[in-house]
Amino acid sequence: MHSLPPHIDTAAELILTRTQSKKLRFRPDLASQYRYVSQEVAFDFIQHGSPGEYPLRLRIVRFEVAEGVCENMVTNLPDDVLSDEIKYLYNLRWGIETSFRDLKHTIGTTNFHSKKVEYIIQEIWARLILFNFCAIVAAHVVIVKGVTKHFYQVNFAMAIKICHHFIRLRAGEPPPDVEALIGKHTLPIRLGRTFARQHRFQPPASFCYRFS
């Protein structure tokens, strides 16, 4: 088996359609490029059953992120944006990706208690406010570098729990020193660590284990 090249920059052209009738195709000579968009899929550019077509050009880029480790990306960026620039932009997005990870899993926006749309939106806003509140508090926590190998950072998952406990205090209960508690729960910063991406099915969480 031959290994795939570490660098790829090619284009894939598709024609999206809402009808499966081959007689209604505008370009029958490009039959291999046609892709049918079913009625269940939201697509505002073509009404279902109409003979309209939507040409789509995608750019497939592969670049090396570490020795022997490659990342595949599908984008609609034009060809004048070099693959090295796409790699740089992808690296800039990593902080956004980690923030979404905290929003989805640490805060618990992958599962909701409500079923109605307006209540789900209310839950999302409540958790976003909690996220911002915790981020502001955690940013003020001073972590002193000791005689250790690594620098340390705030354990954001524990910080969320501490801030959540602080918000839920009843009237008259003595508030804890939130910053001091967060400062006791830290994680080492290990630069250059890589993990293989895991592809697995995730079943829905029970109501008993959801963030509340």
Image: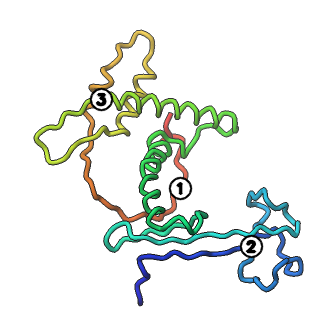
Here the colouring is: rainbow
Residue type indicated by callout 1: Pro
Q: Is residue 181 found left or right of 120 in the rendered image?
A: left
The image shows residue 131, relative to residue 13, as above or below, that is: above
The residue at 27%/25% (across/down) is 180
Q: State the image coordinates of residue 157 (x, y, percent, origin top left).
A: 38, 39
Q: Tell us which disc is closer to us: 1 or 3.
A: 3
Is residue 129 shown above or below 52? Answer: above
Quadrant of the frame with the N terminus: bottom left
CB-based contact (under 8 Å), mark 3 and mark 2: no
Query: How far is disc 2 from disc 1 in space, using C-alphas?
Result: 34 Å
Q: Which residue is mark 3?
A: 141
- Return the residue at label 1: 203
Circle 3 or circle 2, nearest the eye: 2
What separation in Å lies between label 3 and label 2 (alpha carbons)?
Answer: 53 Å
**Front-most of 89 and 51?**
89
Mark 1 falls on what kind of element?
loop
Q: Position of residue 156 (x, y in %)?
A: 36, 38
Amino acid type at circle 2 is Ile
Under tag 3, what secondary structure? loop
Residue 71 as seen in the image, left or right of residue 46: left
* Residue matched to label 2: 15
Residue 48 sits above or below residue 19 on the image = above
Tell me whether circle 2 and circle 1 mark residues in contact (CB < 8 Å): no
Task: Give the residue type at disc 3.
Answer: Val
